[in-house]
Image (tube, helix red, strand yellow):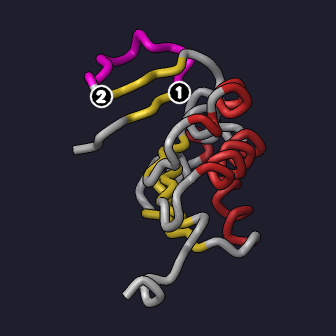
Amino acid sequence: CCKAVTGVDRDQALYTKPSNATIYQMTTDEFFLMFGKTIAPPDLVLIDACHERHQVLRDFENVRAICADNALVVFHDTFPANNSYVDPLLCDNSYLAAQDIVERGFELVTLPFPPGISICRPKPVSLVSVL
């Protein structure tokens, strides 16, 4: 249902690529440095790469710089069930980034089921001005 899909993943062997997708096999930092400003502004972004808090925040800031107005950013691993989820191979400390984003004044809603999904609008624009 999307015209174009852009993905960034260091391990492309994990899935089958849709025909409308371009997958960059690299880190998100490498992607934003080399290609981020060359893609069409995304309307929907899933942040689920490195689960380390500071990397999640860096990915969010990089997405904010290129996304469309009223874009949605979805974060994975933002509601760990217990301490066993706070493992570098699972949620790590990415759930702390959601609180950081709220403290920075952004709208963010977390769906409270493990491992958690949070949704944010980094560039909210009132629809009233469009009507």
- Point out which mark residue 8 bears: 1
Q: Closer to the camera, 31 or 111?
A: 31
Q: Residue at x 75, y 71 (%)?
A: 103
Q: Which range of residues does the magenta coloring cover?
A: 8-19
Label 2: state its secondary structure.
loop
**Residue 29 location (% of width, % of height):** 71, 30
Can residue 75 be seen at all in this image of the molecule? yes
Can residue 80 be seen at all in this image of the molecule? no
Q: Please tell me whether residue 86 belongs to the stretch shown in magenta.
A: no
Q: Is residue 115 above or below residue 37?
A: below
The amino acid at mark 1 is Val
| Disc 1/disc 2 C-alpha distance (Å) | 14 Å
Q: Please tell me whether residue 16 belongs to the stretch shown in magenta.
A: yes
**Residue 54 location (% of width, % of height):** 77, 44
Residue linked to disc 2:
20
User: Could you classify mark 1 by the number of other residues whose Cα lies within 10 Å: few (under 14), some (14-19), or many (20 or more)?
Assistant: many
